[in-house]
Image (cartoon, grey):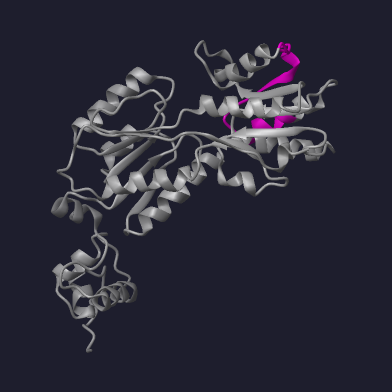
Amino acid sequence: MVQAKREPGRPTMKAVAQEAGVSTATVSYVLSGRSGGGPGISEATVERVHAAVERLGYRPNTSARAVRTGRTGLVHLSLHMLSDPWSLAVAAAVNEAANEHRLTTMILADGDWFAASEAQRADVVYIDGLGAERAEAERKLAALVESGQRVVVFDEWLEPNGFDVIRSDALPGCRLAVEHLLERHTEIGCLTSRASYDSAAESRYSVYRDALRRRGLPIRADRVAFFEDTQASAFSAAVELLSREDRPSAVYATTDFAAIAVEIAAHRLGLRVPEDVAVIGVGNTPDTELVEPALSSVGPADFYRRQARIIVDRALEKPAERGGGELHTFEWDLFARASTAG
């Protein structure tokens, strides 16, 4: 095959078509992200187009594609805390699923999903919780949906309303975590956020408090420590909790990143996990099996891959397709690992 003369500047779809010896329509279909090559397009042709893309360094013009097809090829992820293993696992799973369809994943680091979505449209926007100002967030969400933006929200209370809701109620799982510790321990500490502790509603902290009360065990202030939304804060709180004169023999942490901080703090203080202090977290993130000993946790099975599939499937829908939204529910299980096996 005689290769087309390469023009200076940014490669175009026409140049890719000439390089691969196919029509621009074929290139457009192959690069659209749809599975397979399409009617009459062989796998050999698909491979030839992708090879031409690589040789020329072609990158789709997302603005032009959006005007032409109504799709941008972008997936926006608004994540609450980027350093949290939960957020990292969500991002990794979505990125892997998006790559299969040549979609680009963009993480909104500041969490301002409304402003970001107004500035740059996406095929789907994923929102990790609406935050404390729920009324204002729900107004923005309604405006976003009304504008035609496809949205998937992770939230434990919201109902679908032109957008999908992924619901994964943590509280039953938290009960499993505390009950698991109570099988062997009565001196149980809690590492939690101040917001969970102060909440008037049922929370991850109140699950701990109520479980101890049902067993007739005292709720001791010196067995509770608080962390902010940083790993450094969780580590400091864990060191404080485990350095107290009458330290607990087990710790229930209300997130996996806080539980991992407890393990690190224990090692720093010369304590053995689980012999000196057992530890359990919440979330069942992939990092639970990367620490030593492996961290016991609670969470949905295979949650990250399954959630990623929902998000990417929504991104691949035609722009005109819009329904009332779906509710996707994930049940929680206990994953007992070495950190509570002592």
304 up-or-down from 53: above or below = above
Farthest residue, direction bottom? 1
Viewer-nearest residue: 214 or 285: 214
57 vs 63, left or right, is right
Q: Is residue 196 magenta?
A: no
Viewer-nearest residue: 296 or 26: 296
300 up-or-down from 53: above or below = above
The answer to whether any part of residue 194 appears in the image is: no
- Residue 285: x %, y % from top left: 56, 42
Please report the bounds of the magenta region as a residue range: 216-238
- Residue 128: x %, y % from top left: 42, 34
92 vs 46, left or right, is right
Q: Please identify the quadrant where the C terminus is shown.
A: top right
Viewer-nearest residue: 111 or 304: 304
Viewer-nearest residue: 168 or 50: 168
- Point 48% across, 45% down: residue: 302
- Residue 208: x %, y % from top left: 63, 19
- Point 73% across, 11% down: residue: 218
Q: Please identify the quadrant where the N terminus is shown.
A: bottom left
- Point 50% across, 42% down: residue: 301
| Residue 264 quadrant | top right
The answer to whether any part of residue 54 appears in the image is: yes
- Residue 297: x %, y % from top left: 61, 36
- Point 49% across, 13% down: residue: 201
